[in-house]
Image (spheres, helix red, strand yellow):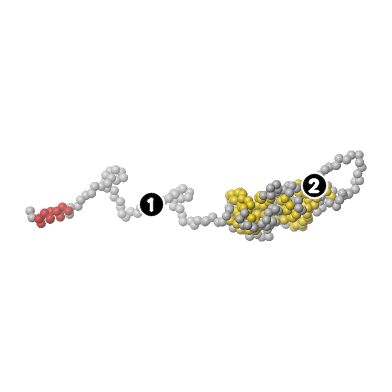
């Protein structure tokens, strides 16, 4: 056989199609698995938020907002919304200088001085860390405290001195105590932040006692007032000693031990007097601040609608 004939035979054998072994299909039958090219494949969908298995719609997502200051309006902010907790700070620490106030990493008051309020800020519900920093150095941490905040609350955190150590503290005051009770009236309450071991009374100019024996860092319940102008007296709570004198006839006429004696009340140790306007639907808080042992006493009246 010639060399050319052998080459022709080899080429003919190469042209015969070869059948490759098939791999087993999913059911193990050994038949070839046929995957149609033109049939679209459906990818598995991920579960939606509610677990239904439907695709998640392309709804724009709202990122959480950081607390923004609420501009004051003559210190009479509106009623709090249910979406946040409205918070402000009041510097009533007579032995402390100006402070910077941070809530978390947010600066809410800079160089807040004694007797002044910050503006209201709106925070989401949860626990927040409040830091008080010496405004002079900008570095010295004076207080760090974690406080709870709840939706719908309107709060004033009062910065005060501890009566024993002088260290700074925070006192929580709820600014919605008169809500739903006023009708056509205004409301008044008293907050004693006068540093010292003393109790205070608040009286009308004619001697009627509105609040009595209010201790340091206490805030009273509110009392309704008709709209109008009022004059008030702040006095140390007197030590009342009822005399037990027998067999002595007393003149029934009205008389006074001194000019500061009020019948039915006693000798009045007056600290200060102030006037204010009671407004319909407004909660007024008389903050008494200062130091009792130095006689440096003042009143700051705050209004909340």
- Element on which disc 2 rests: loop
Query: How far apart are the two marked residues, 2 and 1, measured between alpha carbons?
Result: 84 Å
Number of labelled discs?
2
Q: What element carries label 1?
A: loop
Image position, residue 250 (x, y; %): 91, 44
Disc 1 crowd rating (10 Å Cα; few below 14, some 14-19, many 20+) is few
Query: How far across and down, in percent of the image, does residue 216 sit?
Result: 72, 48
Viewer can see residue 220: no
Query: Which residue, given by chain and number where applicable, does mark 2 sit on?
Result: 238
Look at the numbered discs 2 and 1 and tell me whether their residues touch, using CB distance below 8 Å: no
Which disc is residue 43 wearing? Answer: 1
* 230 sits to left or right of 50: right
Compared across the picture, whether 272 is left or right of 146 comes to right
Q: Residue at x 70, y 48 (%)?
A: 163
State which quadrant residue 26 falls in.
top left
Residue 160 location, x and y as percent?
A: 68, 51
Say whether residue 65 is left or right of residue 90.
Answer: left
Residue 141 lies, in percent from the top left, at: 62, 53
104 or 33, nearer to the observer: 104
Within 10 Å of the Cα at label 2, are there few (<14), some (14-19), or many (20+) other Cα atoms? some
Select label 2 or label 1 by which is in front: 2
**Foreground of the two, 15 or 29:** 15
The answer, for residue 261, to whether it is visible in the render is yes
Picture quarter with the C terminus: bottom right
Q: Which residue is drawn at 48% across and 56% down?
A: 59
Q: In this view, does 24 lie to the left or right of 209?
A: left
Q: Quadrant of residue 100?
A: bottom right
User: What residue is drawn where x is 80% and y is 45%?
Assistant: 239
In terms of sequence position, does the residue under pointer 2 or pointer 1 come before the other?
Answer: 1
Q: Residue at x 69, y 48 (%)?
A: 165
> In which image quadrant can residue 70 be found?
bottom right
Q: Using the image as rendered, state which of residue 47 and residue 171 is in the foreground.
A: 171
């Amino acid at each position: 056989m010639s060399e050319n004939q052998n080459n022709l035979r080899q080429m003919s054998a190469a042209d015969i199609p070869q059948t490759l072994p098939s791999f087993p299909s999913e059911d193990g039958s050994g038949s070839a698995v046929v995957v149609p090219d033109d049939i679209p494949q459906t990818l598995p969908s991920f579960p939606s938020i509610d677990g239904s298995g439907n695709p998640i719609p392309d709804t724009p997502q709202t990122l959480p907002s950081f607390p923004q200051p609420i501009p004051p309006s003559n210190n009479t902010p509106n009623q709090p919304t249910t979406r946040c907790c409205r918070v402000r700070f009041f510097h009533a620490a007579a032995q402390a200088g100006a402070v910077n106030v941070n809530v978390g990493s947010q600066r809410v008051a800079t160089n807040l001085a004694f007797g002044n309020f910050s503006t209201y800020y709106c925070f989401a519900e949860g626990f927040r860390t409040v830091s008080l920093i010496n405004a002079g150095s900008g570095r010295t941490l004076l207080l760090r405290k974690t406080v709870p905040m709840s939706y719908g609350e309107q709060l004033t955190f009062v910065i005060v001195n501890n009566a024993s150590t002088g260290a700074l503290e925070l006192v929580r005051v709820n600014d919605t105590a008169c809500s739903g009770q006023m009708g056509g009236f205004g409301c008044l309450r008293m907050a004693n932040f006068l540093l010292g071991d003393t109790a205070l009374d608040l009286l009308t100019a004619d001697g009627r006692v509105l609040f009595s024996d209010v201790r340091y860092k206490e805030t009273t319940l509110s009392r309704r007032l008709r709209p109008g102008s009022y004059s008030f007296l702040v006095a140390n709570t007197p030590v009342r000693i009822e005399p037990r004198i027998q067999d002595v006839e007393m003149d029934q006429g009205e008389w006074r031990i001194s000019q500061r004696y009020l019948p039915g009340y006693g000798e009045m140790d007056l600290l200060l007097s102030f006037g204010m306007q009671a407004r319909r639907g407004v909660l007024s808080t008389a903050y008494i601040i200062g130091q009792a042992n130095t006689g440096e006493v003042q009143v700051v009246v705050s209004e909340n609608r």
